[in-house]
Amino acid sequence: MVRKGINNGLISQVDPSSDRFFSLFASNVHRHGTPALPKKYFDTLLRLFGNDCEILTVCSAEGKPLSSVLSFYFRDEVLPYYAGDDEDARHLAANDFKYWELMRRSSERGIKIFDYGRSKVGTGPYAFKKNWGFEPQSLFYEYCLYKRESIPQNNPSNAKYKIFIEAWRRMPISLANAIGPHIVRNLG
């Protein structure tokens, strides 16, 4: 898939602002039926973390942004944390190319650990990461429940959210981006 991206003439660029990233991120989460965090949040991350926070964007040979990732750097580790893709990204292999470029650039920077982050077993993101050859490590959590009998299941696979997810997907993206930040702060 990386070779396919190279053969498609994809290029990667480090972005000084969150503009292209946010457009791809917001569109991506909208397609998945989830509200986007506010653009101001990403601008703040870039400002506060400085050189330890970076946005890498992959564009087509014609310059169209296809895939973008905001990553954090700490010591000798990189953590790609937020990402977004255009609908054309998949058939052009932009997502695979993006992570390859992030690994390549991170290696040039002296980074030794690529932390792909958490994914639930049996999900698409888990399979994607495993396909890259990463060995999963189980993470253990401890919860302190207040006024609850069980851990809340605030995730897209919860059937009670299905109607909301479908409605969100149908909403015009401009409206979703306007009201999404007010909703997303109450999720999770």
Image (spheres, helix red, strand yellow):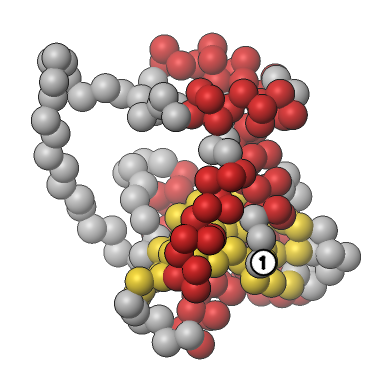
Lateral position of residue 171 relative to residue 72, left or right: right
In the image, is 163 to the left or to the right of 6?
left
Q: Position of residue 114 (x, y in %)?
A: 39, 70
On screen, residue 170 above or below 67: above
Q: Residue at x 55, y 30 (%)?
A: 181
Look at the numbered disc 1 and give the secondary structure of its residue. Answer: strand
Q: Can residue 78 be seen in this view?
A: yes
Q: In which quarter of the image is the N terminus?
A: bottom right
Q: Where is residue 148 in the image (x, y as percent from the top left)?
A: 16, 15
From the viewer's side, name the closer residue of 96 and 3. Answer: 96
At 45% from the left edge and 70% from the top edge, which residue is drawn? 52
User: Camera-side residue: 143 or 87?
Assistant: 143
| Amino acid type at image mark 1 | Asp
Residue drawn at the location 11% of the way across and 30% of the way down: 144
Marker count (numbered): 1
Q: Is residue 83 visible?
A: no
User: Residue drawn 61% across and 66% down?
Assistant: 56
Residue 127: percent from left, percent from top: 43, 51
The residue pinned by badge 1 equals 15
Q: Residues within 10 Å of mark 1 (few under 14, many from 20)?
A: some
Residue 172, placed above or below residue 49 = above
Q: Classify the position of the C terminus by image quarter.
A: top left
Q: Which of the 4 quarters of the picture holds residue 169?
A: top right
Q: In which quarter of the image is residue 100?
A: bottom right
**Residue 91 x, y percent position in the rendering:** 72, 54
- Nearer to us in this view, 46 or 12: 46
Relative to 57, is 160 on the left or the right?
A: left
